[in-house]
Image (cartoon, rainbow, N blue to C red):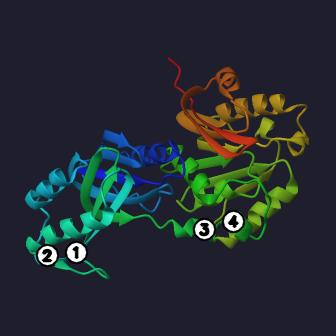
Amino acid sequence: MNIAFELSGEHATLPRAEAIACLESLNVNFREVAFMDQLLLVDVPEFPPIANRLAMTHHILDVLFVCQANIKSILRLVSTADLGIKGRTFCIRVKNIKSAGLSSTALEKEVGAIIHKKGYRVDLDNPDVIFRLVLTGNKCVFGRLIESVDRGQYEFRRPHQRPFFHPGVLLPRVARALVNISSLSDGILIDPFCGTGGILIEAALIDAQCVGMDVQQKMVLGTNLNLKYYGVDGMLIVGDACETPLKSEKVDAVVTDLPYGRSALIQARSLENLYHDSLREMYRVLKKNKKAVIVSQVPLDKLADEAGFVVIERHQQRVHRSLTRHIIVLQKKSEV
């Protein structure tokens, strides 16, 4: 079956990377069919239950057809498509991402009229089936809604809502996406610069075993407060990320937001030394073939290579005029 992920438009590349990594983490045998603006199509044997993990997807559809974004093609294919059991109630929703010249309201009316003639009854409040028609560029994707992602939960966990707050931390949707991009299915995730615990909270909520570490005791105590506030827990350590107190190759994922500025130099001689030494420790504790997802204010390719990692993805997130986050996805390869 073909399924479509209706991706959020909050970032150009992270939503797609998150959806693909979630499929990989569940060992789903999938094939990417197409990637369009805010829409990812994949072929899977059956629908995987991943909506509860995703942060940067709005809806997941069972795709009935893909066609050119013109009214004649759309109406013709809706009229011939197998929509399922007749007599059920339905509603139709049109999402126009970037497709000029087509009216969403007019399409809803005309497509809805065809579906009604095929034996379905309209119910806008509590329909048995929701059909979605997504227009993106010159393409139209039509399908049945399988699941919607509850993105409101992430608003409830925004940093200023937590008992312990510190400015400049990742938003929950970004933190969850980064945890998902690590392809963690089960096992241990470590954040060696845990700060206020935002990454650990999102990892623990998908049942990861979490280890958080920070050189500042107040951050570790604050993280503990925040974890308890959301009903999750983890192992917390006051310690230096350049000397991680874990045995080698015991961790299944590393996800962290590297510190920067004067507050990062409590133990390290310089930021470059801090990044260099902590990356080597991340490499040491990570199991072979597993991933590290690292956020920084500067590119880390050279230091990652020196630590032994292979760079498999790069993303950028512009926060404001003077701050761009560099997100790098690294893998520890098995020795040849």
Please determine whether, in this image, residue 320 is positioned above or below residue 52.
Answer: above
Q: Are marks 2 and 4 in contact (CB under 8 Å)?
A: no
The answer to whether one can see residue 246 in this image is no
- Which is nearer the eye, 306 or 239? 306
Tag shown at residue 90: 1
Relative to residue 269, is residue 318 depicted above or below?
Answer: below
What's the amino acid at mark 3? Glu
Q: Please, what secondary structure does the residue beneath circle 1 have?
A: strand
Q: Earlier in the sequence, mark 3 or mark 2?
A: 2
Which secondary structure lies at badge 4?
A: helix
For disc 2, the marked residue is: 120
Discs 3/2, front = 2
Front of the two marks 4 and 3: 3
Q: Closer to us: mark 3 or mark 1?
A: 1
Locate residue 318, reporting x and y percent: 65, 44
Q: CA distance from mark 4 to mark 1?
A: 41 Å
| Figure quadrant of residue 246 | top right
Residue 108 visible in rendering? yes
Q: How many marks?
A: 4
Label 2 environment density (alpha carbons within 10 Å; few <14, some 14–19, many ≥20): many
Q: Which residue is mark 4?
A: 227
Mark 3 = which residue?
A: 155
Name the residue located 33 percent from the left edge and 55 percent from the top edge. 48
Closer-to-camera residue (265/113):
113
Query: In the rendered structure, which amino acid carries the disc numbered 4?
Result: Leu
The amino acid sitting under disc 1 is: Phe
Q: From what the image shows, is residue 328 above or below residue 319? A: above
